Structure formats: C-alpha cells, structure tokens
Image: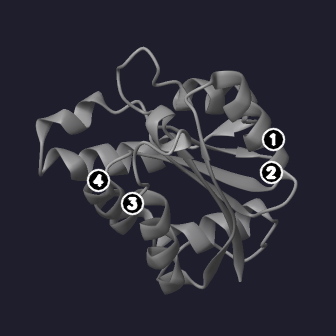
Amino acid sequence: MITVAVLTLSDKGSKGEREDMSGPMIAEILKGIRAEVKHYEILPDEKELIKEKLLEYCRKVDLILTTGGTGLGPRDVTPDATLEIIDREIPGIAEAMRAEGLKKTNRSMLSRAVAGVKGETLIINLPGSPKAVKENLEVILDAIPHAVGKIKGDPTECSRL
C-alpha cells in the first residue's frame, strides 16, 4: 500500500471561501493503485508554509500530491516551493502531463508543475481544477507504483519484454 499526503494549495480554500473538489477526487482516483491518503490539508499559497509541509510529510508518506498553485499568477508558488526542497527532479512526469493536456487545451503549456524526489518520497504537483487533476492523474497513474518502488530501492529490472 502506497501512503499518500494530499495538499490543496488555495488561498480561498484555506479560508473556507471555496470548497476543495480536487483533493477528495485525488483520494478517490488513487484507490485504483492501492494507495491510501493518510494526510490531507488545505493551505494558503504561501511558499514557506508549503515547503514546511512538504518536508514534514516527506518523513511520513511515500507520495505527496499537491493540487493548485501551478499557474502563472503571482500567488502560484507550488512549483517554486517544490523545487527548493527536492533532491532530484523527475521532468518526464510533468512533461507527460503537459503533453497529454495539450491534446485538450493549449493552456496546458502554461503549467509550471514539477515532480521530484525528496529522500524516499515522490512529490508531484497537479493543477487545481478537478477536471485537470483527473486528466493529469490518468496520464501518470500507472507509473506511480513503479516510481515509488524504485525510489524505495526496488532492485528489479525496469525493462519490459
């Protein structure tokens, strides 16, 4: 079982001014890969707070999925916070999400989402809208268990015959 933390980054959501639809959707989708959300929080778009929470959850879970704060707005700082704490970036994850998204909307190219590893935890930034969360997770979902296994030291071969 993959343990997960979901962080929704939204100024309005953190004040109770907007219902978070994306965080609960993530939890539901993850059931398909035997992953369980152990921690869920809604935070304001504050880079230092986001970094603090990412570091806290890296010591507790295998996977952190963030939702929100990946755009071009001045308060969209999730990728910046993520980049400051990860040990290694995994550009292919974000590239795959953007590439698939471009098939539906040219705005996908504006996403600044990143993915990477901190210690033994995989961190992936997802967009904020429920529709985009679902579409992005569909692209990467099958790769997540393999990625988590490799991060944890799984010695089996990656190649397929």
Which sits earlier in the primary sequence, circle 1 or circle 4? Answer: 1
Residue 158 x %, y %:
60, 71
Residues at marks 2 and 3, CA–CA distance in whole angstroms: 24 Å
Give the farthest residue toward the top: 74
Which sits earlier in the primary sequence, circle 1 or circle 3? Answer: 3
Does residue 158 appear in this view? no
Residue drawn at 41 percent across, 30 percent down: 112
Q: Which numbered dot is residue 21?
A: 3
Q: Which residue is mark 4?
A: 132
Residue drawn at 29 percent across, 53 percent down: 132
Q: Which residue is mark 2?
A: 58
Cβ atoms under marks 2 and 1 closer than 8 Å:
yes
Left or right of residue 43, residue 103 in this image: left
Residues at marks 2 and 4, CA–CA distance in whole angstroms: 25 Å
Disc 4 secondary structure class: helix
Nearer to us in this view, 130 or 152? 130
At label 4, the amino acid type is Ala
Residue drawn at 53 percent across, 30 percent down: 79
Q: Nearer the viewer, mark 2 or mark 3?
A: 3
Cβ atoms under marks 2 and 4 closer than 8 Å:
no
